[in-house]
Image: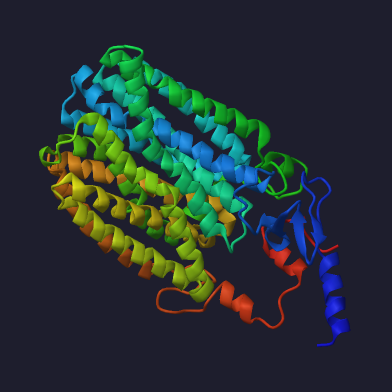
Amino acid sequence: MSADKVANEGAVQKSEVYQDPKAKFQYEEKNGGWYLGKMPVAPEQGFKAKEIQLLSFARPHMRGFHLAWASFFCAFVCWFAFAPLMFFVKQDLDLNLSQVFTTNILSVAGTVMCRFAIGPLCDKIGPKICQFSLLSWIVVFTLLGMSVNSYWSLCIVRFCIGFGGAAFVVTQYWTTSLFANEIVGTANATTAGWGNLGGGVTQMLMVAVYAFMNQTIGLGQEDSWRMSFLVPAFITGVVALGIITISDDSPRGDLTYLYREGVLARKTATQSARLGMLNLNSWTLGVQYACCFGVELHINNTAALYFATKESFNVGPLDAGVIASLFGWMNLFARSSGGIMSDLGNKFQGMRGRLIAQSVCLIGEGVLLIVFSHQHKISSAIPALVAFSFFVQATEGTSFGIVPYIAPEGLGGVCAVVGAWGNIGAVCWGMMFKFGYLGKFDKGYEAMGYIIIASAVFSVFMRIKGQNHMFGGRPGGYRDRRKSRSPRPVSLRVAAAAAPRLVSA
């Protein structure tokens, strides 16, 4: 091909990228690519970011990234604020172990239906309004947690706080909307992982606040744990205000504005729900997500109690909370590692690589949980917990490396189904322990390990349109594009992305 022909094709492609003047952000072409400030973007994917610039807080991509993980982090802290203090709550409200497990189950059950509903709503009104509403709800019921005075009031408050766990679905929807397919696995894994980090931080934060109230201020045991809920409620309220005032739904602005101005075709919650929820792959992946995120929720609810009550560990309630926090702290990098593994698998094997990464992480998770369940000394239990935690979080990362491909046009519905299954899993694990392993946590953990290993088989049954699968099939994504000698013009690729008015000039 001659140099003149290449130049002419380049000129044609440049003219075919159209930006609606009503969009909030206008992008420019420079140095052979498209940018907003220093952020390189992919116009054929609706101007999604091609890099994750962690030190940037620029709108819309990186500000959305940071507020997405921060909001889920706060939701997680409030969600599990009771767990590290349950030893004291149990005493002051005169609860038995079965009642404690019931409140744990309700805390994750409250999230299930909310997750199913919130995903399609993200397509209808945008993620920032959804996230602000969820955080506001959490703040109210976290403050009400100070006033619980019976088993039933505790059940109601924990159930209602659990609605905030749907913030995860919003977080994954938000980052998927902001980052290009080539890095979406890493972006989703990082925001979710740093958000999940709240599960570890809350174990230490609530214990530290309790100790401050009890030992420094001099409050009694009951007043100390009640007053402790002020801290997570205040922090969450601040983040909620930041989301509604200084962030954006998408690379071109807020969805409600873009719909109103005709920049984007309006989506309905019903349409999104139908596309995502009627796709069998959503439910298949959801079962596997129940075996990683569901496991994480269950461990967050039971780990501190397990360490405090297992006699051979010889650990007090405050130290048990600190040790249990190590499980959540692995989210700092473990979930991102899973996303990176998924993206690398996609680079070399397409969807088959993502599915292999998913199965390997599930098997590793199950094996290490069995190993953890057999530890009788705290010195060996801690490293086993940390290793097991890495694979739990990594599997969550590989799971949401697959999600954006299942039904891109019904992303909210897919996020809702997969995310909800995480909580369904937590409910199932809680019921299993309540009715089969009460007082025998180690045996329950061992049984969970074998179930998790078995769930890896579900990867074989996933058939995603346009993608290859575990045993071959037509490869999609990276290799097809890399081998193509005549890539589609930008205008055609833009038309294929869900951006109705990004068309040829």
Q: Nearer the viewer, residue 117 or 185?
A: 185
Q: Nearer the viewer, residue 102 or 73?
A: 73
Q: Quadrant of residue 486?
A: bottom right
Q: How many marks?
A: 0
Q: Residue furthest bottom?
A: 1
* Residue 50 horizontal side relative to residue 414, left or right: right
Q: Quadrant of residue 390?
A: bottom left
Tell me: residue 477, above or below residue 382: below
The coloring applied to the image is: rainbow
**Percent x, y of residue 373:** 18, 51
* Residue 468 horizontal side relative to residue 477, left or right: left
Q: Residue at x 69, y 39 (%)?
A: 256
Q: Is residue 106 visible?
A: yes
Q: Quadrant of the C terminus?
A: bottom right
Q: Quadrant of the N terminus?
A: bottom right
* Residue 381 horizontal side relative to residue 45, left or right: left
Q: Is residue 272 visible?
A: no
**Percent x, y of residue 161:** 40, 29
Q: Residue at x 40, y 22 (%)?
A: 229
Q: Residue at x 48, y 67 (%)?
A: 464
Q: Nearer the viewer, residue 171 or 194?
A: 194
**Percent x, y of residue 143:** 42, 19
**Percent x, y of residue 168:** 47, 43
Q: Residue at x 19, y 23 (%)?
A: 95
